Image: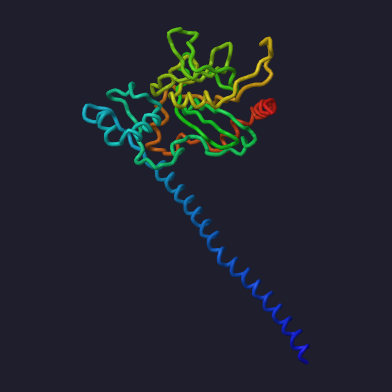
Amino acid sequence: MLLFLLMNGKIFLKILLILACIAGGLFFVLRNRPIVVEKEVIQDQEKEQEKEIIKEVVSGYYLYTISETETLAKLKKDLGDDNFKKVLALNRLDEKFVGLGLKLVVPQNFPEYEFVFSVFPTSMASLNTVPKIVLISQKNQAFAVYQSGQLIRTGPVSTGKKSTQTPNGLFTANWKAKTTNSTIDGSWVLPWYVNLDNFEGISMHQYELPGHPASHSCIRMYENDARFIHDFVDQWNLSSDGASIIKHGTPVLIFGDYEYDKVRPWLNLVTEPNYLNISEADLTKVLEPHMQNILGFVQEMI
């Protein structure tokens, strides 16, 4: 009888031990579960807040006309240096070109979101397998840099004026130089130069932005943007005799048409806040005829 009780007692203790382990496991799961949910909730809230910030900005712009009373200095003081620079970029301008009578489009406010004024989508599924690409919109006078489908840089440009327009099409980064001189006028110094057409001299580089297309077919950029692209893109690889291309450089697609005889397109933001925006669907259509070649360049780099 005593032996029976002892044996059953051991069994009973084992059962209690098993139940205790199960209870402990459930407690651990239940205790930690709210933390995961809380993180998910916080992330969702942050995403929603980000969306609200973007909507808030793109819904409000106003025109500021430079005059004797509404001066550039006054605007700069009211906005602060950082926001003033964003206004210049939004108007595709260097400060030296701002004069009496010039109309500037100005946002109502300035959220701390990197791509809030970008005309390009922040991601492109069709470019997920493309490590690097640069896109130039002539219509909007803006560039975008994508890395594996994600937008990592954008900014204003000045492409060719009406008499010397920048050609559209798919190019690649041929060669680059920290500085070079123009083949049109040797006195023009072109910092952070990336050549796109070795025969026509079409290129991307730093040069002044006057608020409209003004180049001799090149793509002008701010100094910091031109330097970024110069450092980002890969050059071509040539055969030992220089007669053939072994590997093409980073693809660069130039597309769209600037409407030279109409109001500068960014001024339309006052009445249509999304006027400049390019949707992912529309950009996919632009890329579609070139994707085979783009993916071919990618294969060369592997």
Q: Residue furthest bottom?
A: 1
Residue 277 screen position, x and y as percent: 48, 36
Q: Is residue 162 visible?
A: no
Q: Is residue 216 visible?
A: yes
Q: In which quarter of the view is residue 172 placed?
A: top right
Q: Residue at x 45, y 47 (%)?
A: 50
Q: In which quarter of the view is residue 129 placed?
A: top right
Residue 222 screen position, x and y as percent: 43, 24
Q: Nearer the viewer, residue 255 or 118?
A: 118
Q: Residue at x 43, y 11 (%)?
A: 188
Q: Is residue 268 left or right of residue 293?
A: left
Residue 96 screen position, x and y as percent: 33, 21
Q: Is residue 269 left or right of residue 3?
A: left
Residue 109 screen position, x and y as percent: 35, 41
Image height of 11 relative to 271, above or below: below
Image height of 152 relative to 190, above or below: below
Image height of 175 relative to 147, above or below: above
Q: Nearer the viewer, residue 60 or 83?
A: 83
